[in-house]
């Protein structure tokens, strides 16, 4: 191993230990809050009724293909980049997925992620998380924005970015048949929030 490779390994180990320590400090998490670490910053978002309805709707539809143990919500998975420990709203794991030596699911086994926008953390979903999921080669990343009534589909990761993007409205079907997910999701029953302020955050398509 070269000196440079040794330094990289040490840095990665340091990041993992720091992530673990940060999550230890946060336990137990405040009841009713989603807690995650994005690029070393801690974010706590209150669970909202409409957000949970969308999460549950996506979860129920994914169960048409995935067994229950391969669909997760609000479970820590670490992603590439500096101190990224996400608790994604919905995750679907590929067949044969196994936990690592620390008992956590690996980002290499994630084939679908959905994030439902919270107004205060929208910049993460449209920015650092988008970059991290692409760097991890997650085949499908879906952003659902109840403030704008739109969904944003990101597919075909390559070279640390998604090469295909599609934005449509609630009510439009999400066709994932050309991806590993291989099903279609309906959005007719996705509820909307009253404010449209989340769209003020620049999206990846802009």
Image (cartoon, grey):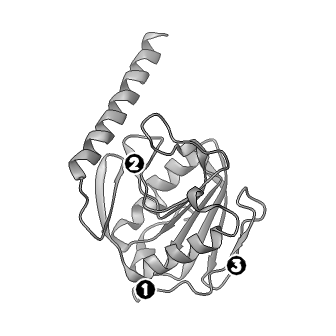
Q: How many marks?
A: 3
**Residue denoted by label 2:** 85
**Residue denoted by label 1:** 193
34 lies left or right of 172? left
**Quarter of the figure with residue 35:** bottom left
Q: Nearer the viewer, residue 25 or 8?
A: 25
Q: Which percent across, then down, holds residue 107? A: 53, 45
Q: Nearer the viewer, residue 193 or 148?
A: 193
> Few, some or many C-alpha atoms within 10 Å of disc 2 (few <14, some 14-19, many ≥20)?
many
**How far is mark 2 from mark 3, CA to CA?**
30 Å
**Between disc 2 and disc 3, whose residue precedes?**
2
Q: For numbered disc 3, what is the local secondary structure?
A: loop
> Few, some or many C-alpha atoms within 10 Å of disc 1 (few <14, some 14-19, many ≥20)?
some
Q: Nearer the viewer, residue 66 or 196?
A: 66
Q: Nearer the viewer, residue 179 or 155?
A: 179
**Residue denoted by label 3:** 173
In this rendering, the answer to whether 18 lies above or below 41 is: above
**Between disc 2 and disc 1, whose residue precedes?**
2
């Amino acid at each position: 191993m070269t000196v440079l490779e040794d330094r990289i390994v040490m840095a990665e180990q340091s990041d993992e230990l720091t992530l673990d320590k940060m999550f230890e400090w946060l336990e137990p998490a405040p009841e009713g809050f989603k807690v995650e670490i994005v690029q070393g910053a801690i974010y706590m978002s209150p669970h909202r009724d409409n957000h949970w309805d969308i999460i549950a709707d996506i979860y129920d539809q994914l169960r048409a293909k995935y067994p229950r143990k391969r669909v997760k919500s609000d479970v820590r998975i670490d992603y590439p980049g500096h101190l990224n420990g996400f608790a994604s709203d919905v995750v679907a794991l590929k067949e044969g997925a196994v936990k690592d030596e620390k008992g956590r699911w690996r980002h290499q086994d994630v084939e679908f992620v959905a994030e439902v926008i919270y107004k205060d953390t929208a910049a993460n979903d449209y920015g650092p998380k988008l970059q991290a999921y692409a760097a991890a080669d997650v085949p499908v990343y879906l952003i659902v924005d109840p403030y704008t009534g739109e969904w944003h589909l990101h597919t075909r990761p390559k070279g640390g970015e998604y090469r295909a993007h599609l934005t449509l409205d609630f009510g439009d079907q999400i066709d994932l048949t050309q991806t590993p997910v291989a099903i279609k999701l309906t959005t007719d029953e996705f509820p909307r929030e009253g404010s449209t302020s989340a769209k003020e955050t620049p999206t990846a398509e802009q």
